[in-house]
Image: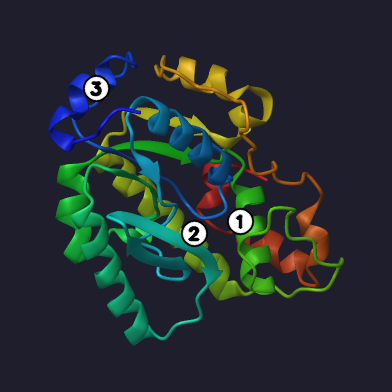
Amino acid sequence: MRDYHPIAFSSIFSDYCTVKFQKPVLLFTTPRSGSTPMYQILERFLSLNNGVYGVEEPLNPFYARYTEENERVVWTRSANEISRTDYERIYTERLTLIKKHYGRLFFKVFPSAFRPEAFEWLTEKHEFITHERKNLFEQALSNLLSDSAKHWYSENGIKPENHSLIASRDAFVNFEKSYFHFLQLKKLLKPKAKFYYEDFLVKSPHELLKEAGFDGLFHQENFTLTKKQSPDDKLLVFKNGKDILSWYRDSMLQTICPH
């Protein structure tokens, strides 16, 4: 594994990519877009070719616990129920931590990560790869399912009983706002590469990387991806499925991805 330093990033990465990066790379995406498998693929590629290592979602205070051990950032997955005051404190601590390890880390950022105190550092010190989901209705359902069940991650998927959950209108509105915030930021960030969840369903990791211009090493031995999201009809798990359909069809999301 190569030693990694941000100053040498361009020369190191140019050995392996037809896409040219001048700065450390982050994955910019939205919640429930199915980004975890793509993150795992990119993290494996970057760790093999650049010596960076993945730390998942450090600027999401609700996700995992982060510490520093032996000059490395380490994390343990856990759901954090925190107050607004704790959110501010944890976000600030995490930002300080990843700045200290700048150039050595690969991680995901959601639109909510671009807070004023981090905006300039994130946008000027990094380049971006985006991950999206074309089927926005399915993504909205997945988001509502996780919000209603209060369960955001499971290796085997989240599988409530049919008609067991009630979706929140506020959660739907927040999802819509987050998605359009993502579109605004994407224009500003000008990503060097774009991936879509639907492509991951039908293509191998090697095919996805090669099509996007990543031509370096990618070993699939001892590499297990998070399972693809279930195609089951998520609408059936909600008691208020008709309301969800109405919210979606009355939203701006309908103009982008009709359902």
Q: Secondary structure at mark 3?
A: helix
Q: Residue at (76%, 65%) from the top-left corner?
A: 242
Is 200 situated above or below 156? above
Q: For the residue marked with disc 1, what is the amino acid? A: Ala
Q: For the residue marked with disc 3, what is the amino acid? A: Ile
Kindly indicate the quadrant of the structure image that contains residue 148: bottom right
Q: Secondary structure at mark 1?
A: helix
The residue at which mark 3 appears reads as 12
Is 211 situated above or below 90? above
Q: Secondary structure at mark 2?
A: helix
Give 166 or 12, whichever is nearer the viewer. 12
Q: Are marks 3 and 1 in contact (CB under 8 Å)?
A: no
Q: Are marks 1 and 2 in contact (CB under 8 Å)?
A: yes
User: How many numbered circles does the render carry?
Assistant: 3
Q: CA distance from mark 1 to mark 2?
A: 8 Å
The residue at which mark 2 appears reads as 176
Is 75 situated above or below 259? below
Q: For the residue marked with disc 2, what is the amino acid? A: Glu
Q: Residues within 10 Å of mark 2 (few under 14, many from 20)?
A: some
Task: Name the residue furthest front.
Answer: 70
Quadrant of the snapshot with the N terminus: top left
Q: Nearer the viewer, mark 3 or mark 1?
A: 3
Q: Residues within 10 Å of mark 3 (few under 14, many from 20)?
A: many
Q: Give how far across and how far down residue 199 sits, in percent.
A: 60, 27
The disc, 2 or 3, on the residue closer to the chain's N-terminal end is 3
